[in-house]
Image: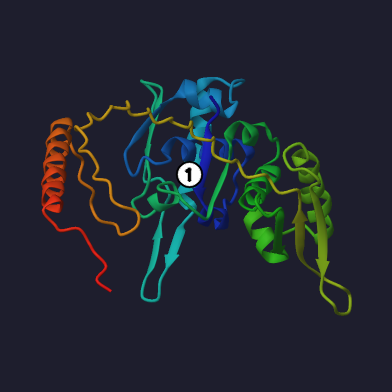
Amino acid sequence: MNEIVKYDNYMNNLKFTGFTATDFNFLMLLCSKMRDKDTTEMTISFEELRLKTGYTQHPIKQFVSDLERMNDKLMKITCKLKTETRIIMFVLFPTFDINLENQTLTVCVNEKFKFILNELIKNFTRFDLNEFVKLDSKYSKSLYRLLKQFKSTGKLQISLEDFRRRMDILASYTNKDVMSKVINPSLKELQDYFTNLDCTVQYANKRGKPVTGYLFTFQPEERVQPAPQPVVQQQKKPVTKKTSKPQEKKKSTNKFCNFEQHHYSKEDMELLERALLRNSENITKKNDRIEPYTDKW
């Protein structure tokens, strides 16, 4: 599996004086291995170091010598953090233990430096170590790192002075040399990793048109969208039938005046019928005792 290098953009501001392409390979592998390890010591075998940096054609003795030489250069790189009241200077890896007997390298990150490799959420540079190792020139490796910082915008604008410092360009190089020996070869080597990569030289608007800086443009990389989370279907709750209570009979009401109507049973109807018949007989007997009507006019 490819190693991923990820560090705070602050690291791109450091000048790695005298670094070779091999030195950069070692350094970037260490950054990859130490990422999110806080200040814990990390032990790496010579075999893994050689394999992942592409260092396979030289004997162990030469390999150890190159490791030692790289660390000597690292020790001379002083990181500096400034605040309003303090200036803090430190080295990147205070522990650099080359064990010839066990053929291992043990390193740890400086307490002051751990923010560059740990808990990176924003303002960071990220790239594939395997791509980085395949590049031949130290200049193409340095430019690769700088461009990766701006992969989402596809635009790096940098002054001539800052470009020379970050790329560790020889002081003897003229601006013409910078273009022919640094920029053009690097663009050719990086074209497989940055689509439509181009460089525009920027000039001052005055006599002689001196070079003031460079504008590197390329097609921005598409942001990788997080994989959609599987939709978890909620299990339907079993439908439980409610046990219905015996319904009470609704009382019917008269539609005209909205009063309750009484429902008579069969026995009630028979009693009512007898009462009506008795009442009718009594009325008939009473009428028989009334004298017939006569017209006295």
Q: Is residue 130 left or right of residue 102?
A: right
Q: For the point 15% across and 58% down, which residue is it?
A: 291
The residue to which callout 1 is attached is 72
How far across and how far down the image is residue 110, in percent? 36, 49
290 or 166: which is nearer to us? 290
Q: Residue furthest right?
A: 208
Q: Is residue 163 above or below residue 271?
A: below
Q: Residue furthest front?
A: 297
Q: Is residue 174 above or below residue 250?
A: below
Q: In this figure, what is the number of numbered marks?
A: 1
Q: For the point 53% across and 35% down, which residue is it?
A: 228
Residue 96 visible: no
149 or 270: which is nearer to us? 270
- Amino acid under disc 1: Asp
Q: Secondary structure at mark 1?
A: helix
How far across and how far down the image is residue 247, in percent? 22, 35
